[in-house]
Amino acid sequence: MKSKLIQLAAATVLATTAASALADVVVIGDRDAFNALGTIAYNSNFDDFGAGFHLPGDPFTRGGVTYASDQNLTVGAGTDFGIGTLRTLMSNNYFSGLAGTIATGYTLFGFDAAVSEGDVPGAARVVDITLTTNQATYTFGGVTLADGVTGLTFQGFQATGAGEYFTGFRIATLGDGHLAGMTDVAVGVSPVPEPATGLLLVGGLGVLGLARWRSGKRASSPRR
């Protein structure tokens, strides 16, 4: 009996450890729900650059994020690209998407974004978003964004793997004519589950396994 209980407990611990080691990134499509996940350290924008085009520098750091596209460009109202109509957005002068790094330790990363439809009117306004963490790389393909004229699209992400945090991002467009931009870029930290939670889970599964083992033993015992 003791040997079987030890084997059961060991198997449970291994299963729990394996599950907690699986890195993952969760997508959150609502900013209020995103903000409720933890503490937001920075929520930065580019409104101070105003209308028109401006080159903030390469690289350019603000709010825990370093923007490192081919050539950083802010797009405001009055330009040929409507993505900056409502808000001034950080973009890339070379149409090769947006890229940057994220300061160490943040498990929450979110932003409002838009992309132009390109040279073909009515073409899909989609991008591929790639996120890197200290553990893995995640790509979310075919994400549809607003046009920046009628609205912006919020994209939020949470790193949920044990000890996992964001290190960088890339927003890839369809190429020439498809200009992407972002603003209200938020980084933060979500609470880390208490270690006792895993122990309670292990203990609960162990008790459940013991109860099932005893039940099976009684069922198989001959009646007197």
Image: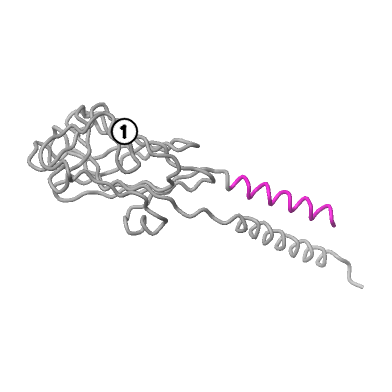
Q: Position of residue 30 (x, y in %)?
A: 32, 56
Q: Position of residue 125 (x, y in %)?
A: 22, 40
Report the predominant secondary structure element of the magenta stretch: helix
Viewer-proximal residue among 117 and 182: 182
Q: State the residue at coordinates (38%, 59%).
A: 36
Q: Report if residue 9 lies within the magenta region.
A: yes
Span shown in magenta? 1-19
Above or below residue 131? Residue 210 is: below
Counting the numbered discs, the total is 1
The residue under label 1 is which amino acid type?
Ala
Residue 133 horizontal side relative to residue 181, left or right: right
Q: Which residue is mark 1?
A: 99
Q: Position of residue 55 (x, y in %)?
A: 18, 31
Above or below residue 211? Residue 82 is: above
For label 1, the crowd category at 10 Å Cα-Cα, with few meaning under 14, some 14 to 19 and many 20 or more, is many
Q: Report if residue 134 lies within the magenta region.
A: no
Viewer-proximal residue among 57 and 13: 57
Residue 5 horizontal side relative to residue 181, left or right: right
Viewer-proximal residue among 212 and 101: 101
Q: Position of residue 154 (x, y in %)?
A: 28, 50
Q: Quadrant of the C terminus?
A: bottom right
* Image-quadrant location for residue 221: bottom right
* Image-quadrant location for residue 196: bottom right
Q: State the residue at coordinates (21%, 40%).
A: 115
Viewer-proximal residue among 45 and 201: 45
Please, which colouring scheme is shown? one colour
Q: State the residue at coordinates (89%, 71%).
A: 223
